[in-house]
Amino acid sequence: MARSHNRDSAPSTTPFQKKEYLYYKPQAGKHNASYISGCSIQDMPVTSAIIYLIDKAVIIHDGTIDIRGWAYSGGGHWPERVEVSEDGGSVLGLVARCWDNVLNTQPTCVRSTWNWNLHVTSSCHRIKVFSVNRSRPATAKRLKRLEQEGIDFLSVTKPLEIDLESDEKYESEMPRRGGRDPEE
């Protein structure tokens, strides 16, 4: 039995295709967007996300942090690589970005390609975590002291219930450092 298919010569006028499943360029916004200026969403875009670690978590580690996530690409393509980068400070801003086998990639920010209802928005996933590296001797010593004294390390913004150093150490270190003022 032969089947016939009709193909429309114009885009669909259904509410979803006409008004919602559209991408807009970064320059478009409430001030100038129109339905005809949007690009139709076809395949699912390249996307990835960090599922472990949790945003704003405190991570106590030995110099390496375990990160887990997922990646996806539509249209018959597959994720080729995911890169996770960090800023190197004590508060790590982790960013996951995926490329697929035909080099489609996630936009770096949501404003690069967007739509009103954020359908299939696929910008890089970003989280921040507070990093506590116990492989550093001073950090290991402080964590051990807190454990011995039964003091919970969390929340990191709550002041400690112990002196940070002895009065003797403070008195001997301040003259050696030349005071508290930073060098200019």
Image (spheres, rainbow, N blue to C red):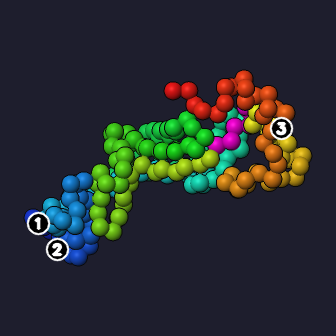
- Residue 128: give x, y in percent of width and height: 55, 49
Residue holding disc 2: 13
Q: Where residue 115 appears, x then y in whole percent?
A: 29, 63
Q: Amino acid at mark 1?
A: Ala
Residue that numbered label 1 is attached to: 10
Q: Nearer the viewer, residue 89 or 7?
A: 89
Q: Which comes before the other along the chain, label 3 or label 2?
A: 2
Q: Secondary structure at mark 3?
A: helix
Query: Dot 1: what SS?
Result: loop
Residue at 60% across, 40% down: 90
User: Which amino acid type is marked by label 3?
Assistant: Asp
The answer to whether the residue labelled 1 contacts the one labelled 2, judged by CB atoms less than 8 Å apart, is: yes
Looking at the rendered structure, the kind of residue marked 2 is: Thr
Q: Residues within 10 Å of mark 2 (few under 14, many from 20)?
A: few
Q: Residue furthest bottom?
A: 15
The verdict on residue 26 being magenta is no
Q: CA distance from mark 1 to mark 3?
A: 80 Å
Is 135 contained in the magenta span? yes
Q: Residue at x 78, y 42 (%)?
A: 164
Are the residues tagged 1 and 3 within 8 Å (C-beta)?
no
Tell me if I can see residue 5 in this picture.
Answer: no
Kindly report the distance in space between the C-alpha atoms of the residues bearing marks 3 and 2: 76 Å
Vertical relation: 114 (above or below) 133? below
Q: Report x, y in % for residue 80.
A: 43, 39
For residue 173, side relative to residue 76 (left or right): right
Q: Which residue is mark 3?
A: 167
Q: Which residue is the extreme one toward the top? A: 176
* Crowd rating for badge 3 (residues with CA inside 10 Å; few <14, some 14–19, many 20+): few
Start-end of magenta stretch: 131-137
